[in-house]
Image: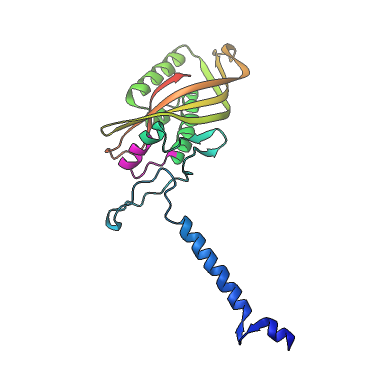
Amino acid sequence: MQANTLQSMGGFPIALVVFAGIALFLILRLRSVLGRRVGFEKPPLPPSQRPGFNTAPIIEGQATVVQPGRAVPDPRSALGERLMQIVNRDPNFDPPKFLTSAETAFRSIVTAFAAGDRATLQSLLSPHVYETFAAAIQARETANEQHRTDIKAIISATIEDAELLGDHAAIIIRFTSDQVNLTLDAAGNPLNGTEAVTELVDLWTFERDLKGPDLTWRLAAARSG
């Protein structure tokens, strides 16, 4: 009889009361979180105008670290506001994903230049930069030289600056990497460079016409940091 008294209250099971209380707490907790704007997101649009933008995982008021050494600026900072201008113009632009893609492009371009892979370079470089790279490759081939590059690690990749002029967007990424770079003669003997790992800092500018059909951000300028 005592057990039945503990398990019921006026014929109503206490367990149901407990579960109902937990459910109410979770609902109130979710309502306090859902709908909160968290970073590089566009202002709310009517359902008929929503482009299906995939919002970035930005924590409000903080720079988001995609992984160690990969920080996305605070969207409320001056740089974050410039990035937000691009977000508002291009529903496909997502700063954390862009940073990851830029790092992949960095590896591909450095490797392709060392290998003399013109096709890969042409797909990732602006016409002017491609001409510069192709001329360097041609000079190397004429001299019967080879270039060997081994990227040991990309220590950091961070967004340094961003600009939107009309439909033209440009973003500067600072890459810090550990590399081995060697130029070899026809016999495979080193002409310059070293087998030692060297830390290099590069500032690369990626550009894209936001109204154009091509979604590729191409390298438009490169210099040492």
Q: Is residue 185 above or below residue 55?
A: above
Question: Is residue 93 found inside the magenta-colored segment of the image?
Answer: yes
Q: Where residue 113 sits: x, y (%)?
A: 46, 24
Task: Identify the main secondary structure in magenta.
Answer: helix
Farthest right residue in view: 2
Which range of residues does the magenta coloring cover?
Answer: 83-95
Q: Which residue is painted at 55% across and 73% down in the image?
A: 20
Q: Nearer the viewer, residue 84 or 215?
A: 84
Q: Quadrant of residue 88?
A: top left
Q: Nearer the viewer, residue 219 or 210?
A: 210
Q: Where residue 72 sits: x, y (%)?
A: 47, 36
Q: Nearer the viewer, residue 101 or 164?
A: 164
Q: Which residue is painted at 44% across and 47% down in the image?
A: 38
Farthest bottom residue in view: 1
Q: Quadrant of residue 167?
A: top left
Q: Which residue is painted at 49% across and 60% down in the image?
A: 30
- In this picture, residue 5 sits left or right of residue 159: right
Question: Is residue 10 found inside the magenta-colored segment of the image?
Answer: no
Q: Where residue 58 sits: x, y (%)?
A: 47, 43
Q: Where residue 120 sits: x, y (%)?
A: 42, 31
Q: Which residue is painted at 73% across and 89% down in the image?
A: 1
